[in-house]
Image (cartoon, rainbow, N blue to C red):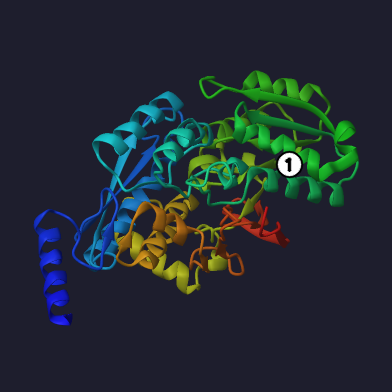
């Protein structure tokens, strides 16, 4: 009987392979074969968010390195990047194309809060993993309502709370002005500020101004914020508007204590375009190892990253932290796929994405990428950092949030 069963199993395996299915013992979802895993990404290769185009460039280079070394469990990663111009309607169109025409296994590292929210319901309805969204919005930790979507970095609410906590400690009578992008990204900063300031929020926040991604400048908003009498400014902006704000604040003679979202904490994309001297003393937050900071230059993780950049991404900036972001997130996806083994179904990739507990070599020591079935916020800690004219230098204690939310 056992011989008959063995022969039947062998025949079944041959038939599955002949029919184009996986070999026996393997389980594949769409976009996966014995030799390839197709992953989709939307990113602003054009339009107002082009500073973020380095994310897919760094990730593509990382996967090129892995593929050269044999891939993941013998399978090459094929990252298909679609330009959405940082426009949510275009993100919808491009995501549908990736899923329905390109037949990708999962969508990874899609750039932008509003863009990713625009496709969240569609992807969850199709049960397509929306992995490690490039956004700090808390919306991507809502595992009960959207179990196929997971974030990556600290939430913007947490960063806003961290800024508020520091302001209360150092300048408890501060008059705060907030410039924010008019979407979920910017609005979460206001929530974080209010949470961190508590009962003092109503009196300490003296003025808020929003901007649209389509605005050519934010000059009028900065002038209005200065007129409020604020002595502290918080910039919940993307790189283009962060650089504009720093330049305009300085040029109109306003000298507030300035805090800026980690989304804009880039030497090459923000501080240099704004003018190095204009950005002196700006405070942001850090959870990646900033390659512009000499603190890390003897660190093995940094040295390995430099070697990677020189060989696989020679045109990329060696001082732009956004290139580190793409590298770190690609490494996270590679870890998840490695954990999946030969069970590369969409259900299993989500299961493994919520079983992470790793220290990435280019994430600040002590900050782990950690998830669970009830925690879709992989990174929940950060450090404050101050721009000194060359880099954002760490100071103060680690700021963390509870593991399960």
User: Element at badge 1?
Assistant: helix
Q: From this viewpoint, is residue 313 visible?
A: no
Q: At which x and y percent is residue 313?
A: 31, 55
Write the residue at 61% across / 32% down: 184
For the image shown, how many numbered marks are present on the structure?
Answer: 1
Residue in the image at 74% along x and 20% along y: 224
Instruction: Give residue 70's position: percent from left, percent from top.
Output: 22, 67
Q: In this view, does 343 lie to the left or right of 293?
A: left
Figure check: 81 above or below 349: above
The residue beneath circle 1 is 192
| Of 28 and 394, the residue lying toward us | 28
In the displayed orientation, state which residue is furthest to the bottom: 2
Q: Position of 315 compared to 215: left or right?
A: left
The quadrant of the rendering that contains the N terminus is bottom left
Picture quarter containing residue 127?
A: top left
* Nearer the observer, 388 or 19: 19
Residue at 73 percent of width and 35 percent of height: 190
Is 197 on the left or on the right of 379, as rendered? right
On screen, residue 241 above or below 8: above
| Residue 189 in sight in this render | yes
Residue drawn at (11%, 74%) of the image: 7
Residue 230 falls in which quadrant of the image? top right
Dot 1 crowding, Cα within 10 Å, few <14, some 14–19, many 20+? many
């Amino acid at each position: 009987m056992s011989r008959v069963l063995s022969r039947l199993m062998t025949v079944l395996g041959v038939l599955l392979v002949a029919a184009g299915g996986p070999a026996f013992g393997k389980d594949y979802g769409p976009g996966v074969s014995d030799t390839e895993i197709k992953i989709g990404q939307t990113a602003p290769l054009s339009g107002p968010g082009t500073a973020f185009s380095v994310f897919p460039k760094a990730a593509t280079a990382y996967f090129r390195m892995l593929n050269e070394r044999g891939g993941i469990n013998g399978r090459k990663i094929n990252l298909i990047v679609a330009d959405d111009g940082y426009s949510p309607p275009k993100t919808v169109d491009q995501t549908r194309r990736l899923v329905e025409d390109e037949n990708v296994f999962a969508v990874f590292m899609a750039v932008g809060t509003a863009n990713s929210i625009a496709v969240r319901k569609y992807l969850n309805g199709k049960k397509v993993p929306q992995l490690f969204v490039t956004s700090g919005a808390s919306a991507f930790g809502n595992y009960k309502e959207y179990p196929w979507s997971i974030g990556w970095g600290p939430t913007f609410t947490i960063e806003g709370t961290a800024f508020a906590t520091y302001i209360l400690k150092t300048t408890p009578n501060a008059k705060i002005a907030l410039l924010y992008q008019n979407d979920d990204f910017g609005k979460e900063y206001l929530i974080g500020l209010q949470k961190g300031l508590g009962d003092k929020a109503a009196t300490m926040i003296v003025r808020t101004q929003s901007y649209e991604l389509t605005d050519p400048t934010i000059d009028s908003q900065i002038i209005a914020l200065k007129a409020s009498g604020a002595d502290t400014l918080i910039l919940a902006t993307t790189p283009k508007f962060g650089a504009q704000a720093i330049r305009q604040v300085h040029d109109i003679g306003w000298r507030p204590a300035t805090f800026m979202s980690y989304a804009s904490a880039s030497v090459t994309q923000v501080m240099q375009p704004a003018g190095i001297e204009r950005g002196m003393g700006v405070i942001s937050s850090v959870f990646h190892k900033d390659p512009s900071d000499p603190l890390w230059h003897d660190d093995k993780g940094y040295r390995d990253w430099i070697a990677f950049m020189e060989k696989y991404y020679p045109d990329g900036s060696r001082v732009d932290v956004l290139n580190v972001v793409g590298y770190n997130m690609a490494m996270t996806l590679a870890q998840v796929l490695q954990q999946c083994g030969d069970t590369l179904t969409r259900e299993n990739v989500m299961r493994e994405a919520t079983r992470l507990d790793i220290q990435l070599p280019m994430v600040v020591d002590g900050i782990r990428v950690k998830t669970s079935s009830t925690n879709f916020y992989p990174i929940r800690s950060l450090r404050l950092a101050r721009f000194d004219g060359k880099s954002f230098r760490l100071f103060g204690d680690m700021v963390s949030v509870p593991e399960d939310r």
